[in-house]
Amino acid sequence: MEKPAKPGQQVLVALRRMIADGTIQPGDRIAEIPTAEALGVSRMPVRTALRALEHEGLVVKLGARGYTPSAVDAAAITGAIEVRGVLEGLAARRVTERGLTADEATRFGAILAEGDALFAKGHLVDGDLDGFYRYNLAFHDLLIAASGNPSIALALARNNHLPFASAAALALDWEDLEGEYVHLSAAHREHHAVFDAMRSGDADKAERLMRGHAGAAVANRKAFRMLAG
Amino acid sequence: MEKPAKPGQQVLVALRRMIADGTIQPGDRIAEIPTAEALGVSRMPVRTALRALEHEGLVVKLGARGYTPSAVDAAAITGAIEVRGVLEGLAARRVTERGLTADEATRFGAILAEGDALFAKGHLVDGDLDGFYRYNLAFHDLLIAASGNPSIALALARNNHLPFASAAALALDWEDLEGEYVHLSAAHREHHAVFDAMRSGDADKAERLMRGHAGAAVANRKAFRMLAG
DNA sequence: CGCCGCTTTATTGGATCCAATACAGGCGAG
DNA sequence: CTCGCCTGTATTGGATCCAATAAAGCGGCG
């Protein structure tokens, strides 16, 4: 059926990719007309996509001369991760203060069990990185959802567009499974610790742990190697 | 000169007002064509504005049948204020950890002096509420700017669109100047306390105070009277 | 020789038109 | 009588065209 994949989304993801992989670098002008011609669509979806990317903070308006990718340096990424930390910390606090419902506890347990299964072997195999990716995302998503505060999800949406700032963007080194085992199992243990704190009703501890969990991503300097080229 | 005030911005602020003051209520459909005709513009700026409002979280897409204002209840506002609290708390922490520059200290001092002048009389007069509005905004803006973390400003931008969630939206009762004096002077004292904590290098205290400062807005239940009609 | 203003031109923002699509209502069959 | 399909229609998304605007280049003047 080769679904045509609507032009609008197509343009949006195309521009995101180009910005992410450096095809368009900060300083380069992004004008509507050339971009539209290059992608084989009209100016309209390009305009829409650029406005969206501006809202996401990925590009900045360059006066009346188009847009340019917003310069993203290590400090910006660190800042975004810090923001994620306090927001997820707040989520953990709120969940704890409201008290876990039986259903939420069950779902957290099921997700954590997935993680347990991944690390039970004592080492990782190829598919496990993908498995961890989904497990990790599920944990964070459930936490945000359980917080009952839509503003947290809204605020986080911004950060998730910056590279490495998203919970989904743990710096995975697909070549060094042994090395990653250390980082990922540590993250998994932190998930358990947060869950335990939430279940025991220690809101301060839950928040602190969750903040530290995000901070661990900052400490993992390997994430920034790509920035150096 | 009666500046024409570009249609796009015009439509955006018009829709924001209509949503804010309840002219358009959650559940009401917002279609492009009727809205465009009602405002006397083409569908294009309406479309742009709706996309922007969707990014801001003020409206939600209603399938293919237009948009509707996102239901905003007391819980949502509380949540947004909590988010503001942790973000501004993070800003205070970062400023403290980095250390106030001489220039920043001077500017904070100048802003706080404005506040001192407002409350020195021991009571408020009409213009003072407007003065406090600007003073308060200046303090919060400077704090965010000084944090050196653009992600904080970005994340806060969302919340500022929700009613009462913005630092600019202290619930001011323009009829009860004596009552407001208590609240506003308390807020002013909190500003001083935050500044002192930042200057003394106590990051934990600065963050805690700033969070509490936002929380005070939650405690001021009068802010929610408008929600009850 | 440098600076100011004008003109030219590139580029965005808006309006109108057209196509794709999804919802709704009615009609028919079981 | 109810469920499912089919057709009609309303509504959004995209393309093209036009106008307003601001940046840049050029020429004249001091």
Image (cartoon, coloured by chain):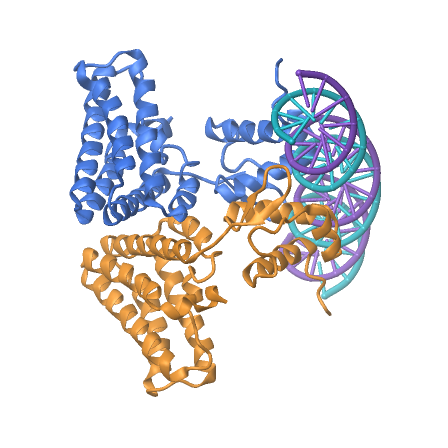
Chain colours: A blue, B orange, C purple, D cyan
Report the number of numbered marks. Answer: 0
Percent x, y of residue A50: 58, 39
Percent x, y of residue A173: 30, 20
Work out whether A33 lies above or below B9: above
Percent x, y of residue B131: 44, 77
Query: Viewer-proximal residue, C10 or B212?
Result: B212
On the question of residue B49 being in view, the answer is yes
Work out whether B140 lies above or below A146: below
Work out whether B82 lies above or below A80: below
On the question of residue A64 being in view, the answer is no
Query: Viewer-proximal residue, B11 or B1?
Result: B11
Q: Is residue B77 left or right of residue A131?
A: right
Picture quadrant where residue A130 is located: top left
Q: Residue at image x 46%, y 26%?
A: A21
Q: Residue at image x 37%, y 42%?
A: A76
Q: Residue at image x 36%, y 71%?
A: B111
Percent x, y of residue B25: 57, 56
Picture quadrant where residue B180 is located: bottom left
Q: Is residue D21 left or right of residue A92?
A: right
Q: Is residue A72 left or right of residue B209?
A: right
Q: Is residue A85 left or right of residue A51?
A: left
